[in-house]
Image (cartoon, rainbow, N blue to C red):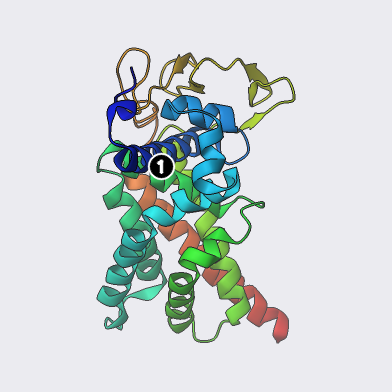
Amino acid sequence: MNAIALQPAAVRGAATREALLDAAEALIADLGFRAPSHRMIAAHARAQTALVNYHFGTKEMLFEAAIERRAARLCSAWAAQLAAIESDPRRGTEGVLRAWWRPFDELSREELPWRNYLCVIARLVSDADSGGWYQRHFGHVERRFRNALVQTLPDCDPDIVEAGLRYARCLFAEALLHRCGKSASMSKTDDGLVERSGEKVALLTPVRAVDAQADDRVHSIGPNGQGAAGRPCNTGVPNGYRESDSTRLIDFIANGIRGMARTTLAAAD
C-alpha cells in the first residue's frame, strides 16, 4: 500500500500535495510545461488523477504553485548577489550578468529537487504560455538587474539593455538545461506520445523521459526522481560541457549588449 495512504487524513492531504508539487517539478524539468498531463503528474506522485484538481484547482494552478514554492529562496539568492555588486563601481556588465547566473550555478549543486526546480525556471524563461508567472514571482528582482545593467551602460538606451537582459536570460536558460542534460526539445503529440526532435517516444507508467546521457535510451522516472535502475534521471553533465563555458557565455552576452549599444548610438549619429 502507498505509504501516504497510511497517514492521518490531515497529514495525508499535505503529503499528497507535496508529492504532486514534486511530480510537477520533475516532469516540467524533463518535458517542459506542455507535455505533462493530469494522468502523468498523478502517476508520478502515486496519487489519484482527480487529486490534481482537488488540491490545486487546475493543472496550471499546480504549475504556478510549483514555481512559487521555492521562489523566495531563489529571489533571496539573487538579492544577495545584487547587494554584493551594487556597491562595487568596477562591477561592469559582466559583473551584473555573473550575479544573475551565480545562484543557478550554486543551487544546481544541491539535491535533486533544487536541480529540477532550476530547470523549471529555465524552461519558464522561454515559455510563451506561462501566463506571466515569471514576472509575477521574479519581476521585482528582474527590474533590479535591469537597473544595475543600465548603470554599467549609461549611454545605452534602456530599451536596448532590457532586450539584452531578455536575450541573456534565454541563453542562460539553455546553458542550464544543457548542463543538466535536459536541453532536448520535447512536446506531447495527439497520440499521447512525447516527441523529441522529430522522434516519437512512447510513455511508460508512471512516465518516460529521455536520458541525454544514455544514448537517447528511455527509462521510467520514479517518485523520488530515480530512474529504472535506481539512478537519478538526467542529472549528469553532458559530454562537451565545461565549467568555463558559463564564464565564456557571460563574456559573449556582455559584449553583445555593448555591441547593440554601439550600433544604436552610431545609427543615432
Provide the residue designation for mark 1. Answer: 17
Secondary structure type for disc 1: helix
Residue 123 in view (yes/no): no
Return the x and y of residue 63 as percentages of the image width and height.
52, 47
Which picture quadrant has residue 16? Answer: top left
Residue 114 in view (yes/no): yes
Amino acid type at image mark 1? Arg
Q: Is residue 32 left or right of residue 230?
A: right
Q: Residue at x 36, y 65 (%)?
A: 75
Q: Residue at x 50, y 23 (%)?
A: 209
Q: Residue at x 33, y 43 (%)?
A: 10
Q: Nearer the viewer, residue 5 or 59?
A: 5
For the N terminus, which image quadrant? Answer: top left
Vertical position of residue 172 compared to residue 181: above or below: below
Return the x and y of residue 183 as percentages of the image width and height.
51, 35
Circle count: 1
Return the x and y of residue 246 as percentages of the image width and height.
38, 50
Q: Nearer the viewer, residue 64 or 58?
A: 58
Vertical position of residue 87 compared to residue 226: above or below: below
Vertical position of residue 179 compared to residue 255: above or below: above
For the C terminus, which image quadrant? Answer: bottom right
Vertical position of residue 241 compared to residue 125: above or below: above
